[in-house]
Image (spheres, coloured by chain):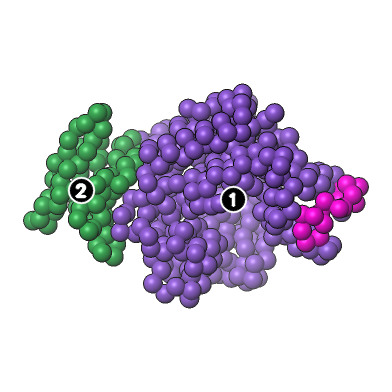
Amino acid sequence: MLETINQQVEVLVAFMKGKVLPLSFSWDNKKYSINKVNLVHSERIGHDKCYFFSVSAGEDSFKLCFYTESSRWVLEEAYYT
Amino acid sequence: MRVIFHVDMDSFFASCEQQACQSLRGRPIVVCGKQGSRSVIVASSREAKKLGIKTGMLPFEAKKIYPAIIFVEPDGAKYENISRRLIVILKKYTEAVEVFSIDEAFLDMTGYVKTEAEAVSRAKKIKIEIVRELGEVVTASVGIAGNKLLAKLASDINKPDGLFLINEQNQLEVLNYSKLTDFCGIGRRLEKHLLSLGIDSVIKLREQPLVLLQQIFGSFCGQKLYNMARGLDDSPVTPYFIETAVKSVGRSYTLPRNTFDKQEILVVLLHLCEKVGRELRRLKLTGRTVVIYWRYADFTHAGARQTFARHLNDSAVFFQFGEAKISKFRLARAVRLVGIQVSNLQDAGFCQLPLWLADRKRTELIPFLDKINDRYGELTVKPAFLLKLNKLRKKVGGFRLRD
């Protein structure tokens, strides 16, 4: 089931070979370890460039967004199995 | 000899969604607008296709076939981004890449491959690179042939994740086994016309003399049908860097429900006028002929057309014209779709400056409004009339690659 979240979250990332690799994030007092980054795409919202990371954590899938203007991470969507 | 590749992404939108969300993989999904809206299915996953759920179906039809079908809302930015990355991959193999649509492209590989075996090996390499760069679910089918017509036909054989080569040995067999609608250019309407003439196969089409086809379908279309039946096509691969002239700019929108409410129609029309004006200004174009049209619930049309004295790209003028026409018009039936199209285009550099000061001030203001919207997002500054817009989806228009 897909749920729209739109909440700011804390994300631990690694910078590897010129790429950003999210490792884990905390949301709702729970820590989620990311086991796979499925897709990365970017979008310009006005002047702000946003990077969307579609990731898998355990059985569930999440869509994280990094807003470059404000350096914020937002959990946009969650898909629970 | 020419060597043309046609790279066609498999169930593109649905594959992108399955790539992004692991939980959707291996399950029948369809990409379409919000549930309850009047959108059609724009893409179905290969699992959904196996069940008989096709693009263009209505959501309730898909649900009837498979009640547990998963509906996913389209994400244009995601598809555009992946498409861009696909084009970057293809450009590595040849500079002659023609972007045919958001999920397909033609590659002129003439000179880059010498033999059929080499062509097949290069196509395999492209397919591997697509999967490596875009993701394991985002696969492509590649068709190889001596021209665009046959290459496109070839990419549809062995789908998904297919690879097919049409050469002199198998060309006739492939053509004879193809349906008329398998050809790019023969749609349902033309097929119906052909069927009414007793032409129900490629073999029968090939039997028709050129003169007869030209008499019935006109010289251009008749010649095209004649060539199609023989697998002939000399159209070049137009590389991405050669700009094709834009002939018209238009937008239309299907309302969430049929309505007689002119205010509701005008709000949508203003949004569409804003979109068309912005697109014209982005392309640095102006237009003289404006067509405003609407579709009734019974799919009949009405509208108005005017050719202005000077070329314009001001959304407000387009809207004033549309508002004047719609306000006067007595709506015969409830309206389900509104649209605008601007044609008779020319370079904005040749545009005459308005004579009156008020008009001139507005013309000078528009680029600054566009800059604000460029910086802070679409419709940051908008006409107050559009404050009622929250009823509509934010994005109007299909998915296309922008320059």
Residue under circle 2? A35
Q: Quadrant of residue B73?
A: bottom left
Report x, y in % for residue B135: 37, 44
Q: At x 17% / y 43%, what residue is drawn?
A: A23
Disc 2 element? loop
Residue A64 spot, x, y in % from top left: 24, 47
Residue B196 seen anywhere in this rendered image of the structure: yes
> In the rendered image, which residue does mark 1 sit on?
B156
Say whether residue A40 is left or right of residue B205. Answer: left
The reply to whether label 2 and label 1 mark residues of one chain is no
- Asked whether, in this view, residue A33 is left or right of residue B299, the answer is left
Task: Categorize mark 1 by other alpha carbons within 10 Å: few (<14), some (14-19), many (20+).
Answer: many
On the image, the x and y values in percent for residue B380 come to 37, 44
Q: Above or below — where is B10 with respect to B151? A: below
Q: Name the kind of residue labelled 2 in the image.
A: Asn
Q: Which residues are magenta?
A: B199-215
Q: Chain of mark 1?
A: B
Check the rendered structure and report the hue given to chain A.
green
The residue that appears at 38% across and 63% down in the rendered structure is B27
